[in-house]
Image (cartoon, grey):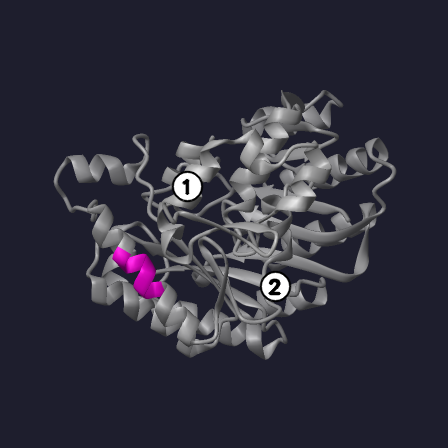
């Protein structure tokens, strides 16, 4: 199985909480797309054993900011490098305000069958505060355009812990449920020191909830609401209708290998982690001149693989298969990580039916559990 991530670094406006590699420039989009296709051809030659892709994920940045024609050119270019498997998943991240009927039709024509929309909140005041360009009506319109064109596997991103009321957060969840998205990603807000949001909070323009008990209650009540609505929590922050789990992201959490294209793209293959040039101009110049654009920043040894198996596996509802772990590493999880026994005794972890999982009501404190174990 083969998986490909493609990074699109362009944004019309940077969200105030964002620290991803992105740019507000738009003058070199066409050149960038050509470089992505050229890098794709290079990776196809470099890893000749990979002829078909099971999943493709276009993330960013704002991939939909490319527009219909550029999106078509990019996807056609990728498909000129690799075939798609019979049961492929092709996901594209879109901001609601950049989705119109032309883009929706183009996505379908190019084989896209899954779209992730950045709703974040259904409160227009909150959206303006955090620097989003869309309003809730544009989100509704985007879902409508995509659905009319045949894309029904739609994710909505929602952020937990924004500067808004508890009621607004749950209104956002209900809105996404009522409009019929098949998948929800509910991520806890992280305020990084180099973000615009951090600076505005320090200036006292607004505040965000920081009480962990309050945030944990929000998460637990969100789980109840979504479970009742028919969404299964298959990963700590991801909820899906039956059969609508994101296969591309599941590969990450299951420790699978994947390729990456584009400025700042990360990829993992042959036990090595790579990162492409993070400067957009340097990336383009290097591709155009046949220079090396990636560097290997980590060779994952056996100990590292064991840690990742636990760290990523416990994010999933299915947990860690104990027999599989022992077969792969020659040691049981509890022997490799003795603190697991303490976490089981405290009711934080559960070992049953051959699997090791986080207790359902302890998922929100997963990072604390992992810190104890690892």
Query: Is 74 situated left or right of 129 in this image?
Result: right
Helix, strand or loop under label 2: strand
Residue 81 falls in image quadrant = top right
Helix, strand or loop under label 1: helix
Residue at 32% x, 30% y is 194
Q: Position of residue 79 (x, y in %)?
A: 78, 52
Q: Which residues are magenta?
A: 217-222
Residue at 44% x, 45% y is 344
Q: Check disc 1: other Cα within 10 Å, few if <14, some if 14-19, many if 20+.
A: some
The dot on residue 114 is 2
Query: Is 111 situated left or right of 52 in this image?
Result: left
Check residue 218 for magenta coloring.
Answer: yes
In this rendered view, identify the residue nearer to me: 71 or 270.
Answer: 270
Q: Which of the two discs, 2 and 1, labels the residue nearer the N terminus?
A: 2
The dot on residue 343 is 1
In this rendered view, identify the residue nearer to me: 302 or 282.
Answer: 302
Residue at 69% x, 44% y is 324
């Amino acid at each position: 199985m083969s998986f490909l991530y493609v990074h699109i670094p362009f944004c019309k406006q940077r969200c105030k909480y964002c620290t991803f590699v992105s740019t507000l420039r738009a003058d070199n989009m066409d050149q960038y797309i050509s470089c992505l296709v050229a890098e794709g051809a290079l990776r196809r030659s470099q890893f000749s054993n990979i002829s078909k892709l099971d999943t493709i994920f276009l993330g960013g940045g704002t991939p939909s900011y490319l527009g219909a024609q550029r999106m078509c050119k990019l996807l056609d270019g990728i498909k000129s490098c690799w075939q798609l498997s019979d049961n492929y998943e092709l996901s594209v991240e879109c901001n609601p305000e950049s989705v119109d009927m032309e883009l929706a039709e183009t996505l379908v024509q190019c084989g896209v069958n899954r779209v992730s929309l950045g709703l974040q909140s259904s409160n227009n005041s909150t959206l303006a505060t955090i620097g989003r360009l869309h309003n809730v009506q544009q989100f509704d319109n985007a879902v409508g355009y995509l659905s009319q064109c045949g894309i029904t596997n739609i994710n909505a991103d929602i952020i937990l812990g924004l500067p808004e009321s508890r009621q607004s957060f749950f209104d956002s969840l209900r809105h996404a449920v009522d409009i019929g998205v098949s998948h929800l990603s509910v991520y806890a807000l992280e305020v990084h020191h180099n973000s615009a949001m951090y600076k505005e909070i320090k200036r006292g323009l607004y505040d965000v909830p920081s009480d962990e008990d309050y945030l944990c209650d929000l998460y637990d009540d969100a789980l109840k609401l979504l479970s009742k609505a028919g969404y299964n929590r298959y990963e700590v922050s991801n909820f899906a209708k039956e059969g609508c789990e994101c296969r591309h992201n599941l590969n990450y959490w299951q420790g699978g290998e994947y390729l990456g294209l584009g400025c700042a793209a990360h990829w993992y293959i042959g036990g090595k982690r790579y990162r492409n040039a993070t400067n957009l101009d340097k990336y383009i110049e290097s591709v155009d001149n046949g220079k090396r654009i990636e560097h290997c920043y980590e060779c994952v040894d056996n100990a590292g693989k064991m840690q990742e198996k636990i760290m990523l596996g416990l994010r999933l509802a299915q947990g860690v298969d104990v027999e599989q772990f022992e077969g792969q590493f020659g040691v049981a999880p509890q022997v490799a990580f003795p603190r697991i026994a303490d976490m089981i005794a405290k009711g934080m972890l559960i070992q049953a039916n051959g699997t090791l999982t986080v207790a359902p009501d302890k998922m929100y404190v997963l990072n604390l559990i992992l810190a104890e174990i690892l």
